[in-house]
Image (tube, rainbow, N blue to C red):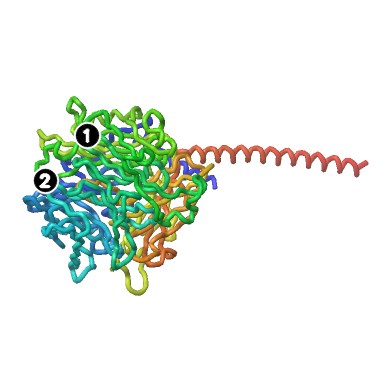
Amino acid sequence: MFVWLLVALVSCERPSRYSLRSGFHPWQVGLDSFSGVVSAFGDFNSDKSTDMVAIGPQPNQVSVLLWNKKSFTFEPQTPVSFPVPVSSVVCADFNGDGRLDVLVSMIVGEAYRTEIRFGALNQLTASADAAFDSVEPVSIFDYNGDLRPDLMATSSTGLRTVWVNKGMEGNAIRFEMVQVSSWPAGTFDKPVSVGFVDVNGDCRPDLVFTDPVSNSIKLFLGTGSPSSPFEARNWSKDVAQLSVPQDAGRPSFLDVDGDGNVDVIFPVSNNKVHVAFNVQKRLCSVSPSPCREPKELCDADPDFYFGTPDDPSSYLILDISIGTMTQSSDFDFGNTIRFPITLRTGDVNLNGYPDLLVEVRDPSGNKFTSIWQNTPCSAENCPSEAVTHARHTFVLLTGSNAEVLQGISNAYAAAFFDLDEDGSNDMIVLSRDSSANKNSISILINYLETDAFFFKAIGLNGVCPEWCPGVRFPNPRVHYLIVGSADLSSPMVSISMESLSSLLSPILMEGSMLVLVSVFLDCCLTSSGAQLWGSQDLALQTPYSLVGLGRTNNYVEEFYIGFPITGTRNVGNFPSMIPNSQLIVFPYKKENPSRWVLELLVSPSESLPWVILSVLCTMAALGVVIGFLQYKERLEDAAEKKKSEHFYAF
């Protein structure tokens, strides 16, 4: 027992790179000499670490950057070249072989040429495996609920077109083209932004479009029906669609106020951020009837609605007062890389409320990234109606060494991601030196000493997680990761049905999912998250959902995960999960959630070494007390025996 506790104590010793004061700290990860634009995240070599794919080192090349956990660096692999400069890259498993492929878009004239390149762990095929033409960036989503990544964009016909992935036929993927005239269509100069995320609370992803023709945001709810997968829905009770300014940026989707509902935020070029809250039934423990019980967390609320500007209790407009928000036209990218004003989200302090990363240009012309922290509404920063309804807003984060972000000049994009799979939202900042024609990648370690808990979930694409009998879906070719038993430095401890010598490697998927977590303390906290809800130009979305739990003292009472699966059974429920853990969900046998395979990885708290030390000290103290009492008892027994012998002698 003592030996195992000592081993655990040594293995949990904090690495020297984290011997830092609380805050954000730049860290060298081997990319100083690499010039490139990071476009997507994913696990390419199945080592359970997040890798990156970048446009570079030349504008017409794509490189996979593999994460090396031992050296704490990214290792660029041999790049793949294309005939023209690359505009964006998206990762997904298109051919269902359990390995990440890439979707590469290039701008040719005033149109997009998009190609699929199959992946083989750390390599990509040299020639196109499929190609598509469109007038706007291609989005990835699941149209027909078969867990295969489908494609969507406005085609040259001027209609919104879906290329439905029908699986492999020989060595190629067969796509079936479907045109949907009721969905908004865009142009090269005014593309449609697409969100694939659950908005009505049934844990089934819906579609949220921005319509550049009518300058509005429109909703189409996922039905699970194979004949009519999506149907139109009003924005609110009396408003069919939300009117937005002509210069509005890309919408983002997050649970701003921690009520378990996905809200919509979008920036406008006049330095305003609009927040439309999603109004649904809350948990019965925090709200009177009508309300939801925990077992009803994934039951749709038919009466849900989004806030409108005339309702201050469910709609806020924030002022980004430190500068002007930037987009691709503010940088010297030419016509190769295009992206609108984008707000990227993540829970920087793991308190359960997501924060914002905003790129701005201050009055002196310096372009940098700023952090806007989620905070409860008060009379100083919100209308009284928002305060009454317990809404949240965002304020500029100062302190915690956040000023280091201003030192990264000419920053055009930034995103949160978990660099070393330790449950913290670190940051990647992309910047450009136009004079030297160099695109730089900066990494900031997030070391906020909050000792808050997190919960991380990854939903996969239905590939069989083991050698399954009968027909496999969808044609999986599974590979395994060999984990050295002598490696005690990993921050993750696996609790799995497989042995540690043959852990199944996580195979990341396309699409979106909704995670709802109910944590019971004095009351209830319900948090929601979405996995890969957007895939257009520089979305920089992570292939997992990371939710902060705050400083909870209890298990995760309920965990629900939903997939875009045809039919009514698209939700899995896994109760009593451990905080500070990562769940990998394999929805094999997609029609039967009770048979889905779950792999659980547990990350120890920073306090664990001190807990183990306290246990050791307590056990040592108890050992001393027990030894002393036993020694005293022996002395008393000896004295009693001697007294008895003396009695019989006389």
Residue beneath label 2, please?
336
The front one of 496 and 425 is 425
Is residue 65 visible in the rendered structure shown here? no
Residue at 27% x, 29% y: name it. Answer: 321
Measured Cα–Cα span from mark 1 to mark 2: 25 Å
Q: Which amino acid does label 2 sit on?
A: Thr
Can the viewer see residue 82? Answer: yes
Query: Residue most toward the front?
Result: 238
Query: Residue 411 at x, y = what percent?
Result: 20, 35
Q: Would residue 601 be found to the left or right of residue 431 on screen? A: right
- Pick out the residue farthest to the top: 364
- Point out residue 639 in the picture as x, y percentages from the top left corner: 80, 39
At a point 23% along the width and 29% down the height, the residue shown is 323
Left or right: where 614 falls relative to 343? right
Quarter of the view holding residue 132: bottom left
Query: What residue do we see at 17% from left, 49% from top?
Result: 213
Say what secondary structure mark 1 lies in.
Answer: loop
Q: Outermost residue, left direction?
A: 109
Tell me the SS state at disc 2: loop
Q: What residue type is labelled 1?
A: Asn
Left or right side of 381 for 122: left
Label ID, residue 270: 1
Residue at the limit of the structure toward the bottom, as seen here: 470
Q: Residues within 10 Å of mark 1 (few under 14, many from 20)?
A: some
Q: Nearer the viewer, residue 10 or 424?
A: 424
Residue at image location 6% in from the left, 50% down from the top? 109
Local crowd at mark 2 within 10 Å, few (<14), some, or many (≥20)?
A: some
